[in-house]
Image (cartoon, helix red, strand yellow):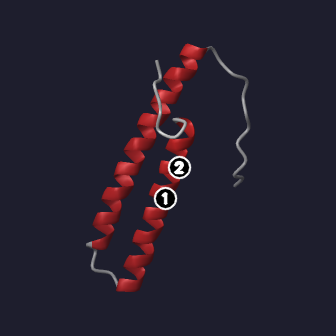
Amino acid sequence: MSNVVPLRARRAPETTAREAAAVVSDLVAIAEQLHDVGARTAALGRPQVETERSVQMLLDAVTAVERALDAITDGGDYTPF
């Protein structure tokens, strides 16, 4: 699997704004789900080291999603339309 994302030509501004808003919405939902999964993971009763590693990896994923949101929204200042 490659972490290289091919770039496409820009589309019309109104299409780009709608797509960006949809991506932002999806990323916010993913971040919320990761938080929930982290809380449920902590309650599984697994060995402490395993639980801590799992929760930390989920928190790292949340951080990555939040960074993606910052990049898409120019640091949180986002008005799609």
Horizontal and vertical percent position of residue 59: 43, 63
Q: Which residue is mark 1?
A: 61
Q: Position of residue 57 (x, y in %)?
A: 47, 67
Compared with 25, 10 (above or below) is above
Could you tell me which residue is drawn at 33 percent across and 81 percent down? 46
Instruction: Kindly report which numbered mark, 2 or 1, lies closer to the viewer in this rendering.
Output: 2
Residue plotted at (65% across, 18% down): 11
Q: Quadrant of the N terminus?
A: bottom right
The amino acid marked with disc number 1 is Ala
On screen, residue 43 above or below 64:
below
At label 2, counting other C-alpha atoms closer than 10 Å, the crowd grade (few under 14, some 14-19, many 20 or more) is few
Q: Is residue 8 left or right of residue 66?
A: right
Q: Residues within 10 Å of mark 1 (few under 14, many from 20)?
A: some
Residue topped by disc 2: 67
In the figure, is residue 46 to the left or right of 12?
left
Secondary structure beneath dot 2 equals: helix
Q: Earlier in the sequence, mark 2 or mark 1?
A: 1
Q: Residue at x 51, y 40 (%)?
A: 75
The percent position of residue 60, horizontal first and vertical second, equals: 49, 63
Mark 1 residue element: helix
Mark 2–mark 1 Cα distance, whole angstroms, equals 10 Å
